[in-house]
Amino acid sequence: MNVGATSAAGAGATPATPRNRTLGKDQFLQLLVLQLQNQDPLQPMQDEQFLSQLAQFASLEQMNNIGGTTAFSAGVQLLGKQVTGTDPGTGATVSGAVTRVRNAGDQILVRIGDQVEVPVDQLTQVTQP
């Protein structure tokens, strides 16, 4: 019997939009807990599988921590150096020595002299004093 291919999309179907396929630590932990809650009591998860998933979770957490530490360390390396950047409030170009570095959650800010705090990604030039 020969069966031809059929399309899953009907005439009024809308095309699927791409979704974010990254798995954050919170989603990973929720998935792990859900898996434990819904496992078959007659065939529980093997110890090796569970330990493997916990190790993956620990690795993910460490990679996230390293990323934040690395970005802050890069900002600290700018202390005392002459930088030029864009003031996020006015859009004006500001220059001067970096006097402070601060972690503001999702970004690293450097204070240029006593003028303004600028995100590290808004710096356009770094030179030795």
Image (cartoon, rainbow, N blue to C red):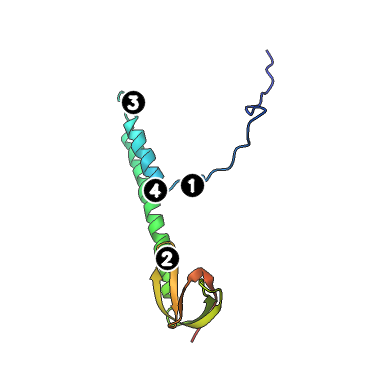
Residue located beneath label 3 in the image: 40
Q: Callout 1 environment at 10 Å: few (<14), some (14 to 19), or many (20+)? A: few
Residue 40 x/y as whole percent: 33, 26
Q: Earlier in the sequence, mark 1 or mark 3?
A: 1
Judge whether 38 appears above or below 26 on screen. Answer: above
Tell me the distance, in whole angstroms, between the alpha carbons under discs 4 and 3.
Answer: 25 Å
Q: What is the CA distance from the residue labelled 2 to the residue labelled 4?
A: 19 Å
First-in-chain label (2 vs 3): 3
Q: Amino acid at mark 4?
A: Lys
How packed mark 2 is, by other alpha carbons closer than 10 Å (few <14, some 14-19, many 20 or more), is few
Which label sits in the foreground, 2 or 4? 4
Find the distance from the CA under tag 1 to the CA under tag 2.
21 Å
Q: Is residue 79 left or right of residue 85?
A: left
**Among numbered discs 1 and 2, the one appearing first in the sequence:** 1
* Position of residue 38 in the picture relative to residue 119 (left or right): left
Q: Which amino acid type is shown beneath numbered disc 1?
A: Thr
Q: Residue 26: x and y, percent?
A: 38, 46
Report the amino acid beneath label 2: Thr
Q: Nearer the viewer, residue 30 or 10?
A: 10
Instruction: Give the labeled residue for mark 4.
Output: 25
What's the residue at 56%, 78% (across, down)?
A: 93
Residue under circle 2?
Answer: 70
The residue at which mark 1 appears reads as 22
Dot placed on the residue nearer the N-terminal end, 4 or 3: 4
